[in-house]
Image (tube, grey):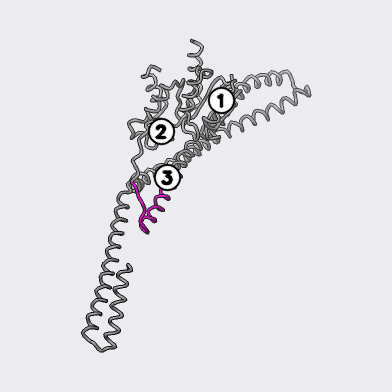
Amino acid sequence: MDSSQKAQQLKAARALVIALEADEEKQAQIQLGILAQSQESDLFHQVGKLTRELHEALSNFNIDSRLIDLAETEIPNTRERLNYVITTTEEAAHKTLGFIDKSIPLTSKLKHITDEFDSSWHRFRMEQHSTDEFSAFEKDIESYLPEVKQHSDQIHNNLSEMMLAQGFQDLTGQVISQVISLVEEVESNLVRLVQVSSQHLEHKQKDSKPVDPIKAEGPQINAENKPNVVSNQDDVDDLLSSLGF
Amino acid sequence: MKILIVDDFSTMRRIIKNLLRDLGFNNTTEADDGLTALPILQAGGIDFLVTDWNMPGMQGIDLLKAVRADENLASMPVLMVTAETKREQIITAAQAGVNGYIVKPFTAATLKEKIDKIFERIDAQ
């Protein structure tokens, strides 16, 4: 309520008291009318202010296109990204477990071969071999050595594959970092939304960010649906060779 | 032959380091982004650079450009090993003078093939 309005009300109230004391009914009615009218105008003023606030809050809500973009595009993308994390970690775990499964029997075979040689070698050292036994021992060595080499190579290869499968940590780490950034952005937008709905804020619509075609994006989700994205090393090689690379 | 491996993920650096060791390259050193890699390169003694693209600080593409712009480093072979698969990115890397481009996830055979190719070209020059 502004001061002139207050003064007007006080003046009317005093005049009302004087009129009532003097038993001037007509004058008292006039002063009551003035007071009621001033009350009403104050109410209209308040309603008007609230309407304006509501309107501005709604406008602010509408113009925050980034928030809409977050809800419509980024959140579904995040769902896809997190699904990618699940799929990639699952594949890596299965791949690693698969190579462990392949390696265990190979180490068992190597142990078996070593055990066989151990007893034979012991008898050889003790010079307990007959000529026939010695020639059988020689043949065993000849047949087992390539087998040992083959199993060792296979185990080495399996270990390398297991190591490569750990690349999932890099790929999923990049995706999770993106999700964390998005969560932070959603959080700050929600905080702003709360501020906007509780009081007026100077609010400027964010300029749409300029698109940087080579901005690092990490692993592409749904690469097969994106025409500007290659899907494997062969595509990369083809593209580079088309550039005379 | 001393190789610098640049990637922000220590697991990936370890994988590349182990694969390079299998290929006979035992002398490797590491950095976790372009900003830490550049002083190592400028200090000298590095013969080959393997770098990721997407890293905090200085990204791989900017490291590549910085290497090509430095007269002492300009001729260094650079292999990019990255999850970045947009055509614009691959073309940009090629134009910036990358010697090989491998997309993650990759295989040991791919790494060997690209490194062999890079050295074949260098030897032919």
Chain assignment, label 2: A
Residue A6: where, in percent of width, then height?
Answer: 32, 72
Chain assignment, label 1: B
**Could you tell me which quadrant the N terminus of chain B lies in?**
top right
Amino acid marked by disc 3: Leu
Say if A155 sits above or below A16 in the image: above
Instruction: Name the side, left or right, on which A64 lies relative to A107.
Output: left
Residue A147: where, in percent of width, then height?
Answer: 60, 24
Q: CA distance from mark 3 to mark 2?
A: 16 Å
Residue A169: where, in percent of width, then height?
Answer: 51, 38
Q: CA distance from mark 2 to mark 1?
A: 24 Å
Amino acid marked by disc 2: Lys
Pointer 2 residue: A215
Q: Please tell me which residue lies in front, A115 or B37.
A: B37
What SS does tag 1 mark? strand
Q: Is residue A191 magenta?
A: yes
Q: Please tell me which residue lies in front, A152 or B107.
A: B107
User: In terms of image quadrants, where is residue A137?
Assistant: top right
Pointer 1 residue: B4
Write the start and end of the magenta stretch as one range.
Answer: A179-204
Q: Is residue B112 magenta?
A: no
Cβ atoms at labels 3 and 2 below 8 Å apart:
no
Q: CA distance from mark 3 to mark 1?
A: 33 Å
What SS does tag 3 mark? helix
